[in-house]
Structures are given as C-alpha cells and as structure tokens.
C-alpha cells in the first residue's frame, strides 16, 4: 500500500556514490579529520585489489565484475605508514581551521574572510602571526587601522599552528555523514574529559 507519507518522506536507498571508505593510516588513525580522509568506493576497491590496504569494515552493498564479487569497503587501513606533515601550509582553509571558523574579533560563526591585525598599509605582513579569521562587518569596521585605533580586541593571539594543532581542531568539525562502521575508528585517540 503506497501512501502520501511513503512517497514524500521515505528515501530510496543511497547510490553507490554515497559509499565512501574511511581511510586509516597503518597506525589505525585517520589520515586527516578535517576534511575527513575518505576515498570513493572505486579507489578503495582498487587499492584492496592491488593489496595496498586491508579492509576492516564493509557496507552491505556488493559490486562485481565478470569474475569478482566484493562488498564495498567502508573502512580501510593502509599497509604502509604515511608520515604526517610536520609543518602546516599557510592557506585560507588552514587559517579558518586554526581560528575554528569564527571571527577573532566578535566570535561570530558566519561566512569568514581574513584580516591583517597590523594592516598591510602599515607594513603588516601576511603571516600566521598577523592574519586572523574575521567576519565582514568586523573587517570593514577595523579597516586599515590598528586594533587600538579601531577600539577592537582579539579573542586569541594569532600563532603558527602545529600540524597536530590543526588535526585536533579538525576533530571539532565532524562531516555531515558518518557511517556507523567508522565510529570505532574516529576520535579514539582524543583526550578524555574529566
């Protein structure tokens, strides 16, 4: 019996593109948290076939070729350890991640831009220690003035983040989709709260 409810609210099963694999390093930690290290199902199957990864968990979905049938991997572990980066690239994304996607003047969590604490017009450089995430209203309000002249304060002093600091910041922003098979492998190395 089909009703208006089932037609409007019950979704059809997800397509194969909705079956990414969580990629873990050889130490069973995700390669990255934000963005979460995910491979398309095709990449995961190819890596498993080439014996570059071990499949830890699978979806209930099967793909097959004329001679092989395989469950789509949902969690895979690299056989070779990939050394994490020791330095952090100075990018807009990493800057926003360091500042947790919030304005460093008012704390707003909206569409971000960035601001030079010491304005470029006054000799300020584009470095980790002089650039912060800012909302547009605060950026316009400050303009090319110093913090004192604009009567504004920073919520945190900007510093160059370590690779671990960015990794930890990324844990605060889980993706929109987390498959149940991933939960045992995410956040297990995070510090427990008292």
Image (spheres, grey):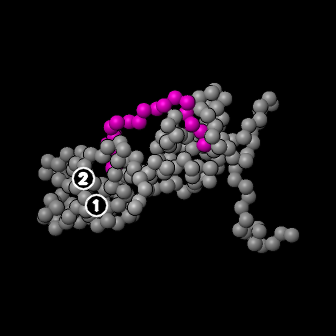
Pick the front one: 181 or 71: 181
Residue 186's x, y, as percent? 52, 49
Q: Quadrant of residue 113?
A: bottom left
Check whether the beta carbons of the residues at disc 1 and disc 2 lie within 8 A of each other.
yes
> Which quarter of the rendering shows the C terminus?
bottom left
| Residue 94 among magenta residues | yes
Q: Which residues are magenta?
A: 75-95
Q: Residue at x 76, y 67 (%)?
A: 7
> Which quarter of the rendering shows the N terminus?
bottom right
Give the numbered dot on residue 104. Answer: 1
Give the numbered dot on residue 158. Answer: 2
Residue 29's x, y, as percent? 49, 42
Q: Residue at x 63, y 26 (%)?
A: 50
- Can you say whether 136 is above or below 91 in the image? below
Query: Which element carries disc 1, helix, strand or loop?
Result: loop
- Can you say whether 176 is above or below 4 in the image? above
Q: Determine whether, in the image, residue 22 is placed left or right of residue 106.
A: right
1 or 2: tag closer to the N-terminus: 1
* Residue occupying the far top of the picture: 50
Could one spot residue 17 in this view of the protein?
A: no
Q: Determine whether, in the image, residue 56 is placed left or right of residue 172.
A: right
Q: Quadrant of residue 155?
A: bottom left
Residue 39's x, y, as percent? 57, 40
Q: Residue at x 73, y 37 (%)?
A: 70
Pick the front one: 130 or 185: 185
The answer for how far apart the CA atoms under marks 1 and 2 are is: 9 Å
| Residue 108 among magenta residues | no
Pick the front one: 85 or 92: 85
Q: Determine whether, in the image, residue 5 is placed left or right of residue 143.
A: right
Q: Residue at x 35, y 42 (%)?
A: 163
**Mark 2 Cα-neighbour bin, 10 Å: few <14, some 14–19, many ≥20:** some
Query: Which element carries disc 2, helix, strand or loop?
Result: loop
């Amino acid at each position: 019996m089909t009703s208006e409810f089932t037609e409007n609210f019950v979704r059809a099963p997800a397509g194969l593109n909705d079956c990414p694999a969580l990629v873990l390093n050889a130490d069973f930690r995700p390669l990255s948290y934000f963005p979460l290290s995910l491979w398309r199902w095709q990449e995961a199957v190819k890596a498993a076939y080439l014996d570059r990864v071990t499949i830890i968990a699978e979806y209930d979905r099967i793909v097959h070729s004329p001679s092989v049938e395989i469950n789509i991997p949902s969690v895979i572990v690299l056989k070779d350890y990939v050394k994490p980066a020791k330095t952090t690239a100075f990018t807009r994304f990493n800057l926003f991640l360091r500042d947790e996607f919030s304005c460093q003047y008012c704390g707003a969590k909206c569409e971000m831009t960035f601001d030079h604490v010491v304005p470029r017009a006054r000799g300020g450089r584009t470095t980790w220690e002089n650039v912060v995430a800012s909302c547009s209203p605060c950026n316009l309000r400050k303009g090319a003035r110093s913090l004192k002249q604009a009567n504004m304060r920073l919520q945190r002093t900007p510093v160059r983040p370590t690779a671990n600091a960015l990794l930890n910041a990324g844990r605060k922003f889980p993706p929109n989709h987390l498959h149940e098979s991933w939960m045992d492998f995410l956040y297990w190395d995070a510090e427990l709260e008292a």
